[in-house]
Amino acid sequence: MNVFKSTSVKALLGACCLSLAAVSGSVSAKDSTKPIVIPIHNWSSQIVMAHVIGGIFESMGSNVEFVPADTQAVYESIRNGDVTISHEVWQSTFGKSFYNAMAKGGVIDAGTHEATTLEEMGVPTWVIEKNLCPGLPNWEALKEEACYKNFTTADSGGKGRWLEGPQSWHGEMMPIRLKALGLDKNWTVKFAGSADALWTELASAKKEGRGTMVFNWTPNFTDAEGYTFIKFPEYTDGCRKEDGGDGKCGSPLGWLKKAANYKFPKTHPAAYTAFSKVSFTTKQVGEMAALVDIEKMDHKDAAKKWLADNEKTWKAWTK
Amino acid sequence: MLVVLKQRKSLQCLLLLVIFMLLYRFVPQSETNWLWRLPSLLKELPIIINDAVNYLMFEWLPIDVYDPDIEEYEQKPLFGQITRGFSGAILFMIELIREILLGGVKTIVAFTSWDWVSENEWARWPALPWTVITGGMVILGYVLGRAKLALFILCAFTYIAVFGQWEPSMKTLSFVLIAAPIAILLGLWLGVWAYKSKTVETIMNPLLNVAQIMPHFAYLIPVMVFFGIGDHAGAIATVIFATPPMVRLTVLGLKKVPPEVAEAGLMTGCTDRQLLYRVLIPSARRDILIGVNQVIMQCLAMVVIASLIGAKGLGNDLLIALNQLRIGKALEIGVCIVLIALVLDRLSLAWANKQTDYFADLSFKQKHKYSLMFLVVFVVGIILAVLGSFIFKEGFNYLYLIPQNKGITTEAFWQWGVDWIWETFFYSFKAFNVWFIVDVLVPIKTAFLGMPVIATFTLMMGIGFIVGGIRSALIVGGFLLFIALTEWWDRALITSYLIVIAVLISGTIGITVGTLAAQHPVSSRFMLTMCDTFQTFPSFIYLIPVMMLFGVTDTSVLIAIVVYATIPAARYTIEGLRSVPQELHDAAAMSGTNRFQKWLSVELPLSFPHMALGINQTVVFALSMVIIGALIGTDDLGQLILKSLSDKAGVGNGLVLGLCVAFIGLAFDQILRTWADQRKHALGLS
């Protein structure tokens, strides 16, 4: 007991000294050996991609550490340097947090993936097959009673319900759009609290065979079963209310960006160069998710398999 | 007339109700009418808090710090350096325990450097085989609690290993093993301090309430800004959440120590210190141990939330499983969390109850019997692990660490269970749900939102006045005023509507179940274990099936809250009923009461103060679930707290919103506590 006590005291002192004084490392232009911190969120493609990127860094001799993090709060951590990168910044869901952190300073934009994303209201394809809303995916179909009456719920007051993601994703955008398009007489927006709530709603609606309109995105695991996004009037620059427009437009084809702490290029120049070149396509993102969601692999094993199968692709980024 | 009114509480209540109704009916609804809604004078408060935090953290007292990686001096504010130093120390301790259990490199790095470790590939600390840790824990269980505890620990740890949850469980364990002792010691220290000084107690009480009621999400961002992200941040958030009950119960226990005991201590010549550690704390042991139990339960209840700011282990895995809607897997993980909680709780209880035998004269072998036994387990475990590496060739070794997806799983069974419930009950559930929403929830919600601010104040302050006089009325009014002056009054009304319904349901269920269970020692012990289980079992897990059955609606939110908030109502009812002295039971029996009469006229009134505290805790638990409700989808304060995670002024918004939630709780607390104290006084219990 005594031995344990004295070591723990020493250890404590050691740790204090360390974190306060930051013991110096070797001085050269080489990458630092301090670990690159990669955040882990709670969906498959993100976790596999984290391990893939971690694997790429490790192949270059860097140390890597993974840390679980909240999807919105992580940008504050990147800004403070507690997390080094984020490799899946979705335009519509995380754009706001990302730009807020960037405005405060400390976060840099490390390039964009080749994959384009779409984040929009939509219905599972079987809703269209059952003809619950004749005329979809054209948005004008929503005006018809034959459509919205199939989307009512107990608490929607006789209106059809749009199940939107949490308010932290796009604030009041959907209610504004609903109103601008004159759909608010027959439709109402309900904010779900989390992505889990969206997936549960999809599963539950499918079992019951009732109509459901849910905010979703692609690439996503729902692609496998078929998901149809509603075609709203096309997005043009400045059409949204916060940009001074009338709000009568759908979502743009979005980007998938990478973010990094501002010191990353200086501390790990080689790793940063590779990271800035990393660019996954929609197909690759889908593959990574499928390894876990469909083939039921462990995230780490999935990442190993992906790295082994696609060596040509990622080796090019490290040069 | 006035004299009658002064004496008759029922008349006062009636009068209050009439005034409330009149105000409700006749105050016109318009945004400019102050009787309807107060102007949001505190609108700027979040921004001010936010700026203050930013200033403290990023600008105040900058010092030059050399960053060897970029070979530059950087200006870093002092405060941040201090908090990061603190984080480093906590993280180091967590990593140390984690690496003893699971192996790793961080501890070695702490004494050398990443450069050195990268150059010396051999410098890796190996993990202990799961057999060794399980064996060690079983021996510990045997030493402290004999065969029963040892057997329980053996089952628990084998379950964890065999179901492939070893690594995440050990990660969680290492983080709890730091957070729980800190919370216990801090709680004990604060409790003793509050016991010694009345002023401290008066100041501390509301702070404890705030810390306990404030939804954890509200301080996640501040914790993250101050301390960074990782296990240490998770541990700090957990300590904030888990310490209050420890402080409370320490004070309660110390106060219950009869003065004769303390005097006896003084007479034998105890110093202050000896009096505290040798006399007072041991005498207050029973309540302090309930405090320890609560700390451990709360720590494990925070595992999932802590994973949002970087705590590794079960919590994070659980969130991933839920995102894939894998209920079975989430359930298995949830069971691991509960098992860890129960093991730690029973171990700490056994340790505290173990008496040291000062007079035993033992030989070396006898004294070190268990250490020698562990040594044997250690060697055998390692030999087995080495042998295992020859038997299992697939890259994983069942006798060393069982990887996550290689254990056995009962997922298919649970999935089948959920499907079965769906197929059997869905349509009756749906009919109930539609009725409940249309005929109950929506009208009540509308009624709450249609309440003029003056009517709310009159009602709450009036109740405060009837219960506790002008003082209580002013305190309640003060809390409400703060909320009314923010821009979130309507949101707060929605939160209150959910809480009021949830507390009514939970209170009814809890008191009924508690009363039934308290009739027999076995059933009450069973019920208390159930309480422990549900308190630590992550509510996220039953959210998914509940949402499948009841949709993204307020019904689901209420079910989630009720499951959690019923726990204290049941727990305190049992404790209350069981504390009724045997003589009174006998006296009641002798005067010829039947079972029901005894319950109604003897047990219930006598255990009322306990039950009132139970209801008070029910309100606290219900409010702390507001944020879980938000994860389903609500439009109350909880949803805004979630939203503050991505706001520009997130720190300020989160904290002020959290305060609003806490103040709702404090207003209820003021009324219930005063009432309970008066009853106690009337019954001669205080």
Image (cartoon, coloured by chain):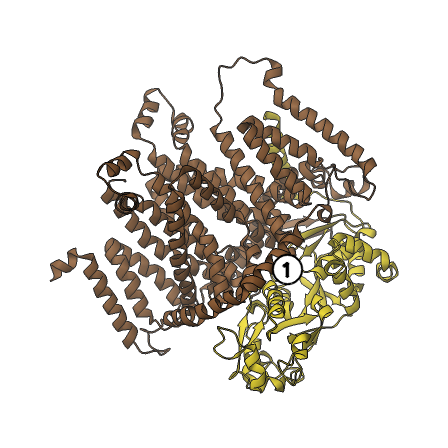
Chain colours: A yellow, B brown
- Name the residue type under label 1: Leu
Viewed as shown, does residue B269 lie left or right of B375? Answer: left
Q: Quadrant of the N terminus of chain B?
A: bottom left
Q: Is residue B319 visible?
A: no
Q: Is residue B341 visible?
A: yes
Badge 1: chain ID: B
- Near mark 1 (Cα within 10 A), the count class, few <14, some 14-19 or many ≥20, is many
x, y (%) of residue A40?
68, 56
The answer to which of B124 and B419 lies nearer the viewer is B419
The residue drawn where x is 23% and y is 68% is B18
Viewed as shown, does residue B252 lie left or right of A249? Answer: left
Residue ranking furthest to the right: A312
The residue drawn where x is 74% and y is 54% is A299
Residue A246 picture quarter: bottom right
Q: Quadrant of the C terminus of chain B?
A: top left
Viewed as shown, does residue A127 lie left or right of B189? Answer: right
Residue A189 picture quarter: bottom right
* Position of A170 relative to A37 (above/below): below
Residue B103 picture quarter: top right
* Position of B239 relative to B559 (above/below): above
Q: How many marks?
A: 1
The answer to which of B66 and A266 lies nearer the viewer is A266
Q: Secondary structure at mark 1?
A: loop
x, y (%) of residue A202?
62, 68
x, y (%) of residue B636?
46, 66
* Position of B231 relative to A71 (above/below): above
Which residue matches tag 1? B325
* Position of A2 relative to A231 (above/below): above
x, y (%) of residue A304?
80, 53
The residue drawn where x is 37% and y is 66% is B484
